[in-house]
């Protein structure tokens, strides 16, 4: 019997003991990966008799949807990401299992441990005199087998502490938090969907021998060189209409089974934003939060979400979409468009050359003409890049409104 089965069985065995006390505070948690131990912070807050839990990465506190204690075990769930932690409570420690439902609906599991009151995300070995400095921006290459893709590394250093992210053509790697340990950079992020661990050696203006682990078992290598002018291809040029097309054409069902088409009268003569997304996608959640707020401020602008989910079975997909809409205050329709696969999204929107990212955002003018297709989303974790996106987006919509 393997260790995960032993842990799971130990957590669900009936106990006649009363529920143990879960202490509020900051817990340092760990899950093992193929690239080493991934640390993150779990914050438990208590308001009167209610407990809340958050995954903490840099400036972000991401709330778990569900927290409850059964027998001697803590249960934490992030419903949108199909992620769950079940851990036995013992004084100031937690020990159990992290589980996540993957894109193909298979379950991936790993051991989970946490200790209350440990203030350091990464355990370092050097004294303050040995801390190296890194640049604020790097041109980065990630190597995935025979495929190499570009990124821009963005970092802020304060002593040994480092926060930052990586920009890629499909979106950013969200809020990364870590340290400089001797000659090494170490960064991690755990948000229920992303399980990210980055390490690299610092050699002058280069980051070398980099390892990037995601989803516990998947490993890429990477390298970077300091470059204040590093940039990615224009996100508005990667996905585009095929020759001969000027408009979108689609019809998908909403949560009530009603077919909604971009050709419906409701969208005639209206600026319309089509959001290609998945409720399982953290970058999509960043964009959804932005668009929900934008929709409130600009009710005259129409928005349609096209959701590509892990399953198109309404019994599976609709609760996910409903939970996403409730969390972010979404009032625009979100339609079940297909499976969470870029090739399926490309097939459902055949007038486009291809969909290479969730999210992808398509802006349509009052005449129904596609005016812009934006690949990916640079969320709040990217700092000035997010601010720049918001400013450019608002300027472009203002321009279309005046036409």
Image (cartoon, rainbow, N blue to C red):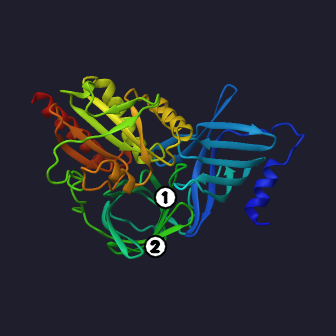
The residue located at (75%, 64%) in the rendering is 3
Say which of 5 and 42 sits in front: 5
206 over 159 or under it: above or below = below
Tag 1 near tag 2, CB within 8 Å: no
Q: Position of residue 397 (x, y in %)?
A: 19, 34
Local packing at callout 1 (Cα closer than 10 Å; few below 14, some 14-19, many 20+) is many
| Quarter containing the C terminus | top left
* Distance in Å between CA atoms under marks 1 and 2: 14 Å
**Secondary structure state at the residue bearing disc 2:** loop
| Quarter containing the N terminus | bottom right
Task: Name the residue beneath numbered marker 2.
Answer: 183
**Secondary structure state at the residue bearing disc 1:** strand
Task: Name the residue beneath numbered marker 1.
Answer: 178
State which mark lies toward you, 1 or 2.
Answer: 1
Say which of 4 and 95 sits in front: 4
The residue located at (38%, 32%) in the rendering is 259
Say which of 156 and 165 sits in front: 165
Tell which residue pokes out farthest to the left in this image.
403
- Precedes in sequence: disc 1 or disc 2: 1
The residue located at (24%, 44%) in the rendering is 388
The answer to whether 150 appears left or right of 45 in the picture is left
Task: Look at the image and tell me whether residue 5 can be seen.
Answer: yes
Task: Look at the image and tell me whether residue 156 can be seen.
Answer: no
């Amino acid at each position: 019997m393997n260790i995960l089965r032993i842990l799971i069985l130990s957590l669900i065995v009936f106990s006649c003991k009363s529920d143990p006390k879960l202490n509020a505070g900051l817990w340092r948690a760990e899950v093992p990966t193929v690239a080493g131990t991934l640390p993150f912070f779990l914050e438990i807050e208590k308001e009167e008799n209610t407990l809340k839990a958050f995954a903490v990465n840099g400036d972000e506190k991401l709330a778990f949807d569900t927290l409850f204690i059964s027998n001697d075990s803590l249960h934490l769930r992030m419903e949108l990401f199909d992620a769950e932690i079940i851990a036995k409570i013992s004084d100031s420690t937690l020990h159990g299992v992290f589980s996540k439902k993957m894109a193909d609906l298979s379950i991936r599991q790993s051991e989970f441990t946490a200790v209350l009151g440990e203030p350091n995300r990464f355990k370092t070995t050097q004294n303050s005199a040995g801390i190296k400095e890194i640049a604020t921006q790097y041109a980065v290459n990630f190597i995935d087998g025979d495929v190499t893709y570009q990124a821009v590394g963005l970092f802020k250093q304060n002593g040994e502490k480092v926060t930052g992210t990586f920009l890629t053509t499909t979106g950013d790697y969200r809020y990364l938090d870590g340290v400089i340990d001797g000659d090494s950079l170490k960064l991690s992020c755990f948000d229920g969907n992303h399980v990210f661990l980055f390490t690299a050696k610092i050699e002058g203006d280069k980051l070398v021998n980099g390892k990037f682990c995601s989803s516990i078992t998947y490993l890429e290598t990477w390298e970077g060189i300091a470059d204040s002018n590093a940039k990615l291809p224009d996100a508005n040029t990667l996905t585009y209409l095929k020759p001969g097309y000027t408009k979108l054409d689609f019809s998908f069902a909403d949560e009530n089974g009603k077919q909604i088409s971009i050709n419906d009268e409701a969208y005639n003569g209206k600026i319309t934003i089509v959001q290609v997304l998945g409720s399982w996608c953290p970058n999509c959640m960043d964009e959804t939060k932005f668009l929900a707020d934008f929709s409130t401020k600009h009710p005259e602008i129409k928005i349609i979400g096209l959701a590509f989910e892990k399953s198109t079975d309404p019994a599976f997909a609709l609760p996910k979409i409903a939970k996403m809409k409730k969390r972010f205050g979404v009032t625009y329709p979100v339609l079940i468009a297909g499976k969470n696969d870029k090739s399926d999204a490309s097939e459902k929107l055949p007038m486009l050359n291809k969909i290479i990212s969730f999210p992808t955002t398509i802006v349509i003018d009052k005449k129904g003409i596609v005016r812009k297709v934006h690949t990916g989303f640079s969320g709040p974790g990217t700092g000035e890049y997010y601010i720049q996106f918001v400013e450019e987006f608002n300027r472009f919509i203002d321009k279309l409104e005046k036409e």
